[in-house]
Image (cartoon, rainbow, N blue to C red):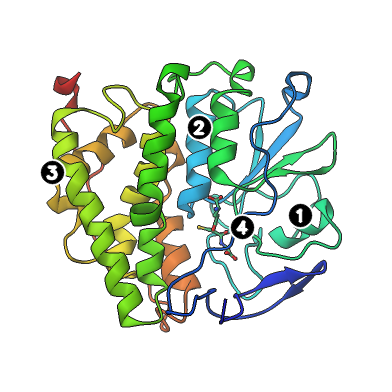
Amino acid sequence: MLVPAMGHVEDGKWVRGEGFPTDRKGGYARPESKFRCSSDVPADAVVAGRFHLYAAYACPWAHRTLIARALGGLQSAMSVSIVNPFMGEDGWDFSPADGVVADPIHGAAHLWEVYVAAQPDYTGRVTVPVLWDRERGTIVCNESREILRMFTTVFAPLGTPTVRLCPPELQPQIDATIDRNYRPINNGVYRAGFARTQAAYDEAVHELFAALDAWEPVLARQRFTCGNQLTEADICLFTTLLRFDAVYHGHFKCNLRRLADYPNLWGFVRDVYQTPGVAETVRMDHIKEHYYRSHAHINPTRIVPAGPLLDLDAPHGRERLG
Ligand SMILES: N[C@@H](CCC(=O)N[C@@H](CS)C(=O)NCC(=O)O)C(=O)O
């Protein structure tokens, strides 16, 4: 990593910084999450009120967990805090604004304080989502994919799921689909947007659009990515595609085509959005405010654009696929 990361924690203290971690070729090098649960929460720990989720409406990774919480009917069993959409020099914080939900456990002003409460000598990035265990007084996990899986499996008994996002028989296909989309799509938009060289950008943007091109005919034949039922793999794809035209197309220069130019992908986004419970997790104001205002190295004026006008409620007609 040649460029030291933007703000992060070193030995329990917040260190300000700019830019994003970059590899030798100027490509974005996303750091690994440090608190990994691998779904090992013992059954006797699965208790309503024990766990707390720190999330951002702005962030596509955190958004996965908010959707799983909603579709799993876990709202009353699992409390939530929401950070302010603007990520400034001191990282994510809880300064009051519409939609922000303060930290009821530590009364933290900044999210980094939660990481240090979990591990006083913590060194690393301070990212959302974070799952906190009140009983053990620590972070269980800060990797969205693992939190998502916990919500859809071990934590499922705490809620009344309206959708089974991870049926066991589909799990291998779900995992393969999430893996397949991670590099070119979910992380691909960031690799394009945070690239420091033309070559790194070119590689990312072409891989991204090749992956979208590949999904378009598949989603003409089937309603969702793993067949005709909504799964975790769709949630993971949805949170990136939802942000595509509003943010990644302009701010991250992912502009070979708009998502709206793909009738099936755009219909898929509207279909997931219109699934009962999902729209309440979508705050386009937080999404736009976060990206355009927080990344001053990409958008130095920090002006948030007015458009595009997106009609997420427009009929999608995808029920016909099954
Ligand atoms: N691999 C992590 C990535 C989480 C992540 O990068 N979240 C972003 C917000 S979209 C963040 O908090 N960034 C702050 C930073 O990197 O300092 C996951 O999937 O949970």
Looking at numbered disc 3 in the image, what kind of residue is underneath it? Pro
Residues packed near mark 1 inside 10 Å, few (<14), some (14 to 19) or many (20 plus):
many
Q: Is residue 22 above or below residue 227?
A: below
Query: Which residue sits at x=34%, y=28%?
Result: 275
Q: Is residue 101 above or below residue 209?
A: above
Looking at numbered disc 1 in the image, what kind of residue is underneath it? Val
- In this rendering, position of residue 310 left or right of residue 78: left
Residues packed near mark 2 inside 10 Å, few (<14), some (14 to 19) or many (20 plus):
many
Query: Which residue sits at x=53%, y=79%?
Result: 19
Q: Position of residue 231 (x, y in %)?
A: 39, 28
Query: Which residue sits at x=48%, y=41%?
Result: 64
Res. 257 image quadrant: bottom left
The numbered mark, 2 or 1, whose residue comes first in the sequence reads 2
Looking at numbered disc 4 in the image, what kind of residue is underneath it? Thr
Give the residue at mark 2: 68
The numbered mark, 2 or 3, whose residue comes first in the sequence reads 2
Mark 4–mark 1 CB contact (< 8 Å)? no
Give the residue at mark 4: 127
Specify the quarter for ligand 1.
bottom right
Looking at numbered disc 2 in the image, what kind of residue is underneath it? Ala
The numbered mark, 4 or 1, whose residue comes first in the sequence reads 1
Give the residue at mark 3: 263
**Element type at mark 2:** helix
Give the residue at mark 1: 114
State the CA–CA distance, disc 3 to disc 1: 42 Å
For disc 1, does the CB lie below 8 Å from ligand 1?
Answer: no
